[in-house]
Structures are given as structure tokens and as C-alpha cells.
Image (cartoon, rainbow, N blue to C red):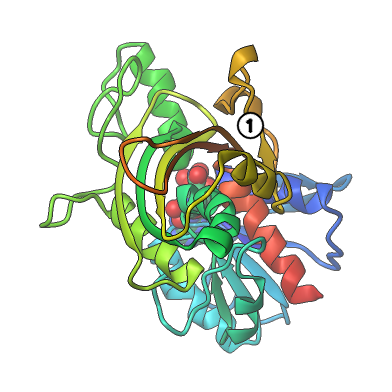
Amino acid sequence: MAIVGATGLVGTTMLQVLQQRKLPVDNLLLFATERSAGKLLKYNNTEIAVQALNANSFDDGINIALFSAGAATSKEFAPIAAKKGCVVVDNSSAWRMDTTVPLVVPEVNPNDVQNHSGIIANPNCSTIQAVVVLNPLHKVYNIKRVVYTTFQAVSGAGNGGLNDLQQTSQKNPPQHFPHAIANNCIPQIDSFDESGYTFEELKMINETRKILHEPQLKITATTVRVPITFGHSVSVNLTFENPFEVAEVRSILQDAPGVIVQDDPANNIYPMPITAAGTDSVYVGRIRRDFSEENSLNLWIVADNIRKGAATNAVQIAELIQN
Ligand code: NAP
């Protein structure tokens, strides 16, 4: 097995998740840029030296490579790895909407992994946590429309994002985000397209449709960067085809794989980034009827963006491949 981008925020978390989930790994190779070559990273009581990624990196019969080194690296190196018989699980946006590449959340569409031709894509972090909750409700009530509003942690932008929160709080200019993020909310994640949507918003729309196999589903999204280190929050408004009871919704979600319901407003209990951070579950609360529209519901969904939103989901896909 290999991790490409092993020194990054997602890559180092992949190392931890691989150990915690005890995935059988015979030989682990770690790749990053030339800058990181020789750096030692801990894996199960051993230290592994990071190697600079190049076109020959996959020559030695690697079965699975977890990529988290950005879209440009994935575009260039994932096909090289796949050609050499390696199955790539890619965290970047490079392959997600490619019709030949499955986009997989194991709790939602595990069977899609079967249809790969060497590359499987891991969805966008906010999309992963949303569809884990939407899917069990869609099966029962048939979702007609989705409105997403996100509150996304700075770690979603990697080490650069975390540095910006620390730096700008010390009054230095931001290096990564277009504005200071400390004491601020930035309603821009990624760049804008000509319609006025950001690419992050379009990712949530398109990826939700692909994972749920609902290419026509009505979805809109606003994605916002907030000064939180770890844990994305998503406010979701859903309109269903079928009528529902809130108690039944709660019960469906309590039984849903990967979901923990935290919904006791009388005792101030609801999901929050500080309680989700460092865990692998998707938390849902503030479950309530939207009285302004027939068959409509409001939800608040929180998960650790680096774990379930990236590293853990990728390792779960690797587990599906190995089984
Ligand atoms: P990061 O902390 O900035 O780390 C980037 C990693 O990629 C580093 O290991 C870096 O190596 C490596 N890298 C960059 N260019 C490379 C190249 N040309 N060849 C080999 N390695 C290269 O970023 P991150 O947060 O871990 O994110 C990595 C990827 O995961 C991105 O595609 C991102 O979109 C995706 N992702 C992130 C999140 C999240 O919440 N952060 C969620 C889902 C998906 P050096 O250390 O040597 O520079």
C-alpha cells in the first residue's frame, strides 16, 4: 500500500486511521514532494522514510494507493499508478465527476466500488457527511429538493488553512485565504464560476447527485469558511415527496450506519465541531419540521472533515477493495 501526500494533513491522518482500523498492510510506502524526501513518519512502532513521488514510484507492485496530494498530482500520477495495477483511492477533485470513476461513501453506495477501472474517488468533505444522513431518508421519503449551507473549518484547506488562522490572529496578512479568517466568515471556498457559484458549491451539488444516483435532484448550496480548526457543519433543508413524522425521521437516523443522533434541545444537546473533532462518525441534530413548506425538514450535520470527510472515508474504501 502507498500514501501519496503522506506529510499533509489528510495523509498523516490516513496513517493514524490505517493503524486504528488495523487494516492489513504488508509494505507501506510514503510519498510527498522532493522537499519532504527522507522525513521519517511513524507507523505502528516503525519509522518510514518519505520518498519523492515520481513516475517510477508504483513499479514495485503496490496494490492500493491512497492519494491526497491535490488535483494536479492526481491527474498526473493516478493513471500511471492504475496502469501498473494499483487501485488508486483519490481524495482530490480531479476524478470525482469522471463517468468512468466511482465516487464512493461506504455507508451509502458501497457497491459502486465494483465498477472501477483503477481509480476510485473520495468525495468532497462536506458532501460525505451530508449524504451519510440524506441517503437513509431518501430511501423512505424520496428527497425532491436540498438546500445546503456549510460552515467549514480551516483545516479543509490543509496545513495552509490552519497556518492562516494562526497567522492572521497575529495580524499577519493571510497566505491562503482571500481575507483574514480569524474573527471572520468568508462566503467563498474555492474560486467562482461565471454563474456566481463557487466550485465548492458546485462540488456539493454534483457529487450529491452522483453518489445518490439522482442526476436530476434539485440542490442548491452556499459554502462558508469559518474560524474553526477541525469539523465542518452543514445546515440542510430538505423537501420530500412523501409525508413524514419527525419522530420517525429521528428513529431512521438512529439506525443509520455511521450516524449518531444528538438531538435533545431541552438539554442544549446538538452536534458541534468541538465534540465531533477526532472522531469518525457523522452527527445529526436540530431535527425539526420546516413549517414554511409541505413535507420539509431542517437538519444540522457535523463531522470531522479530515477524518470522515477525507482520511477515514478513503481507508473505508480501501477496506471495501480488500474484502
Ligand atoms: P496539505 O496539508 O497541504 O498536504 C498536501 C500534501 O500533498 C503534502 O504531503 C505535500 O507534500 C503533497 N504534495 C503536494 N504536491 C505534491 C506533488 N507534486 N507530488 C507529491 N506530493 C505532493 O493538504 P491536505 O489537506 O492534506 O489535502 C490534500 C488533498 O486532499 C487535497 O487534494 C485536498 O483537496 C484533499 N482533501 C482535503 C480535505 C481536507 O479537509 N483537508 C478533505 C477532502 C479532501 P509536501 O509536504 O512535501 O509539500
- Residue 1 seen anywhere in this rendered image of the structure: no
Question: Residue 255: where, in percent of width, then height?
Answer: 73, 50
Q: Amino acid at mark 1?
A: Ala
Question: Residue 103: where, in percent of width, then height?
Answer: 52, 70
**Quadrant of the snapshot with the C terminus:** bottom right
Marker count (numbered) = 1
Question: Residue 67: where, in percent of width, then height?
Answer: 56, 63
State the residue at coordinates (37%, 73%): 215
Question: Residue 87: where, in percent of width, then height?
Answer: 64, 78
Report the residue marked by disc 1.
Answer: 276
In-front residue for pair 208/48: 208
State the residue at coordinates (32%, 43%): 293
**Quadrant of the snapshot with the N terminus:** bottom right
In-front residue for pair 108/168: 108
State the residue at coordinates (30%, 19%): 184
Q: Is residue 96 above or below residue 290?
A: below
In-front residue for pair 21/84: 21
- Residue 239 seen anywhere in this rendered image of the structure: yes
Q: For this view, does 228 lie left or right of residue 112?
A: left
The answer to which image quadrant residue 224 occupies is top left
Q: Is residue 222 above or below residue 277?
A: below
